[in-house]
Amino acid sequence: MPRSAKYDLLTLFPEMVEGFLRSSMLGRAVNRGLLEINVHQLRDWAEGKHRLTDDRPFGGGPGMVMKPEPIFSAVESLNEGEACVVYMAPDGEPLSTALAQEFAAKRHLIVLSGHYEGVDQRVRDRIVDREVSIGEYVLTNGTVAAAVFLDCVSRYVPGVLGEEKSLTQDSFSNTLLGFPQYTRPADFRGMTVPEVLLSGDHVKIEAWRKERQIEKTKQTRPDLLNNQSLEP
Ligand code: ADE
């Protein structure tokens, strides 16, 4: 199978996510040639004796701002012409299944993770195509956010998960939360698996699972139940 996607991650802390991106399903997808994932040290594009990547903000204020030059140089050298440049930022578009699916259709992503008080605005204005947030909270830097984003996107690249069906049964993909899963042993310390799952009756199993999904969604995310068909 030809490679479906290439992901370049630019960060000041590659060691935070190198292992993560080589492990589990992502590692398998890379080994199978479905994905190419490269983690780059942004400082490699910084100039001068100290290879500085940040500086004080014009106009004053606390913290440091990431300088534009290394970021422009890095993106220009990595972009083969068609890349989508994504900046991880708490004030970006919220990551969702729909957004992940949209990015999974792109052949080349360059993902930039910010640090300090963020990046120079000229980066956001000129070379960033999209800005993505992984949630309404602020992390110390965007590197882990970038890894979460790439993990989430990769699941929708054809072939990465192996079993396409498991995607459609995910929490959120049909806007109900997931159902409980059990495996052997059927009796563990007196805690038994619900009888219906051992019955072999797939119609009954499906109905039971849908009921559990509705119950769980009512309990923890009632907001998801609006405009939702609750038919079994
Ligand atoms: N960088 C810091 N916090 C972040 C968040 N919540 N999402 C994306 N990037 C971030």
Image: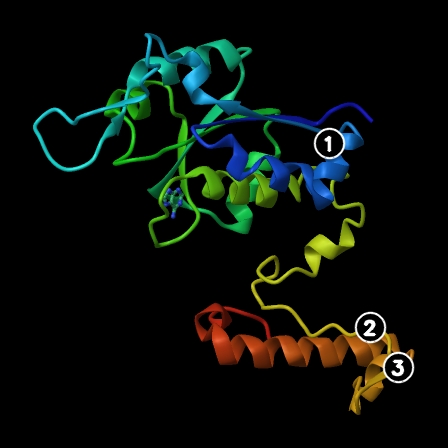
Residue at image point 74% right, 36% down: 29
Pointer 1: residues within 10 angstroms few (<14), some, or many (20+)? some
Residue annotated with mark 1:
30
Q: Residues within 10 Å of mark 3 (few under 14, many from 20)?
A: few
Say if mark 3 contacts mark 2, CB within 8 Å: no
Question: In the image, what residue type sits under mark 2?
Answer: Thr
Q: Residue 187: image x %, image y %?
A: 84, 86
Q: Which residue is mark 2?
A: 183
Residue 146 is situated, as x and y percent measured from the top left of the image, at 49, 38
Going from N to C along the chain, the mark reached first, 3 or 2, is 2
In the rendering, at what x and y percent does residue 202 appear?
A: 86, 75
Report the amino acid beneath label 3.
Leu
Whether residue 231 is visible = no
Mark 1 / mark 2, whichever is N-terminal: 1
Give whichever of discs 3 and 1 has the lower sequence position: 1
Secondary structure at numbered mark 3? helix
